[in-house]
Image: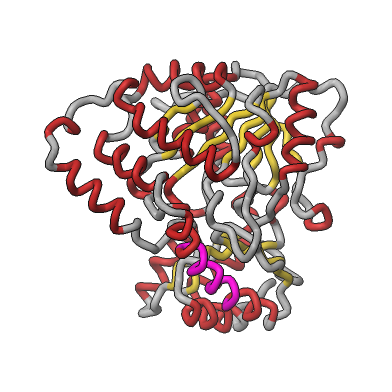
């Protein structure tokens, strides 16, 4: 009786079905190999943990953090953006700490849109995007991400009469692992500015890149009308710490700060200190973590192709996105696979209608475990 219209509009999740299937597998005596959740299994850098340990013994960190207390983290974020992307931002007015990028996005949509505004979302996309849009009361117009376009959206397909309030993108992409170059962001930013549309770029995989590829920032296209969300969950393996930052258009950052000021006091100061230290670490630290996921990619992708599945070699992120020939229902297949083999994957349909026919693998196990998981999936009927 207490369910609001906003809460009721939040889409249900198929991951409850996956949790049940994993429980059935365990009850049957199977070892569960969970490749369905994109949470890094690597530890944060030791130096980051040392900073946090020291902070927990400092009584100055126990109080509510005010905006002025966030200056060290804001300055560290600005320094990171300058070193990594050549983007200059004002730490006072163009950077804001977040309690994770997912929290930041939900509050950002509340801050920069009104109910009934149109939000452009890719399909498939990270499922919480849809929930955040529902809570904000937005009209969602989806942009299909198709393999033949490299899973990049076709903005030319947006009807001429539509003036979206915001466009939300995410590259390196979850779930497809697709990447975008700086020229793409320049084109998208120009398209958005011509329509008065805010470009929101969710960038949690900025440092999980492989080989010579380095992901650009949407902010390289200019700060006007562009805001980017960064997270330390993937790049520094700090998912449980819930810390990140938003940077970009000063007006959008100010609006976000106003909403957040009504609902939170920023992350714990000890976590802010740890995050600031992490953002200042040498580039080699992040590259070492990325190399672990690259080795896992190199183990899993050939094993999936040996099954006859279609999967590109990811240049970034922590996922492999595989099209399964003849697949009827990706949800039914994923549930069946978990029950029969103990291998849990994410069904493509969980990410939107455009994900049907695919499954997503999170590279959160060692190479030998990933190879064995692929072999086990080869025994599961696809229809």
Q: Is residue 320 left or right of residue 152?
A: left
**Which residue is more in the foreground, 173 or 223?**
223
Q: Is residue 371 above or below residue 50?
A: below
319 falls in the magenta region: no
Q: Looking at the picture, how far across and down is residue 45, in whole percent?
A: 34, 57
Q: Where 203 sits versus 259, above or below? A: below
Closer-to-camera residue (263/208): 208
Q: Main secondary structure of the magenta part?
A: helix
Q: How is the image coloured?
A: secondary structure
**Residue 188: image x %, image y %?**
76, 34
Vertical placement of residue 182 versus 7, above or below: below
The percent coordinates of residue 58 (x first, y second) are 14, 37
Q: In the displayed structure, does residue 52 sit left or right of residue 319? A: left
Q: Is residue 224 above or below residue 101?
A: above
Instruction: Identify the residue shown where x is 65% and y is 37%.
Output: 218
Q: Quadrant of the C terminus?
A: bottom right
Q: Give the image location of residue 148, x and y in percent.
A: 83, 57
Closer-to-camera residue (259/199): 199
**Quarter of the figure with the N terminus:** top left
Q: Would residue 150 appear left or right of 107 to someone viewing this image? A: right
State how many labels appear.
0
Q: Residue at x 75, y 36 (%)?
A: 186
Residue at 36% x, 22% y: name it. 263
Q: Which picture quadrant has residue 202?
A: top right
Q: Residue at x 71, y 62 (%)?
A: 357
Q: Which residues are magenta?
A: 289-299
């Amino acid at each position: 009786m207490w369910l609001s219209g906003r809460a009721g509009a939040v889409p249900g999740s198929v991951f409850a079905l996956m949790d049940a299937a994993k429980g059935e597998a365990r009850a049957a005596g199977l070892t569960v190999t969970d490749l369905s959740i994109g949470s890094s299994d690597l530890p944060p850098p030791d130096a980051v943990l040392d900073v946090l340990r020291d902070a927990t013994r400092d009584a100055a960190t126990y109080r509510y953090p005010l905006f002025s207390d966030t200056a060290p983290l804001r300055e560290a974020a600005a320094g990171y953006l300058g070193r990594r992307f050549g983007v200059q931002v004002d730490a006072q007015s163009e950077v804001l700490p977040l309690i994770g990028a997912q929290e930041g996005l939900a509050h950002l949509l509340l801050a920069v849109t009104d109910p009934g505004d149109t939000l452009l979302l890719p399909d498939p996309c990270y499922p919480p995007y849809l929930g955040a849009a529902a809570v904000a009361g937005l009209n969602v117009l989806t942009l299909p991400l198709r393999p033949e376009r490299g899973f990049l959206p076709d903005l030319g397909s947006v009807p001429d009469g539509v003036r979206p309030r915001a466009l939300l993108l995410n590259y390196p992409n979850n779930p497809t692992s697709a990447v975008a170059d700086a020229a793409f962001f320049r084109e998208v930013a120009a398209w958005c500015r011509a329509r008065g549309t805010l470009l929101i770029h969710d960038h949690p995989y900025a440092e999980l890149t492989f080989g010579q590829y380095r992901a650009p920032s949407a902010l390289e296209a200019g700060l006007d009308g562009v805001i980017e969300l960064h997270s330390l969950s993937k790049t520094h393996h700090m998912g449980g710490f819930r810390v990140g930052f938003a940077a970009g258009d000063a007006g959008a950052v100010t609006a976000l700060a106003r909403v957040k000021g009504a609902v939170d006091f920023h992350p714990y100061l000890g976590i802010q200190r740890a995050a600031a230290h992490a953002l200042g670490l040498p580039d080699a630290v992040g590259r070492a973590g990325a190399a672990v996921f690259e080795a896992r990619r190199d183990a899993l992708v050939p094993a999936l192709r040996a099954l006859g599945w279609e999967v590109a070699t990811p240049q970034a992120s922590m996922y492999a996105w595989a099209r399964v020939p003849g697949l009827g229902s990706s949800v039914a297949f994923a549930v069946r696979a978990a029950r029969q083999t103990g291998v849990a994957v994410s069904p493509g349909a969980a990410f939107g209608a455009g994900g049907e026919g695919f499954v997503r693998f999170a590279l959160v196990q060692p190479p030998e475990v990933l190879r064995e998981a692929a072999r086990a999936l080869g025994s599961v009927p696809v229809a």
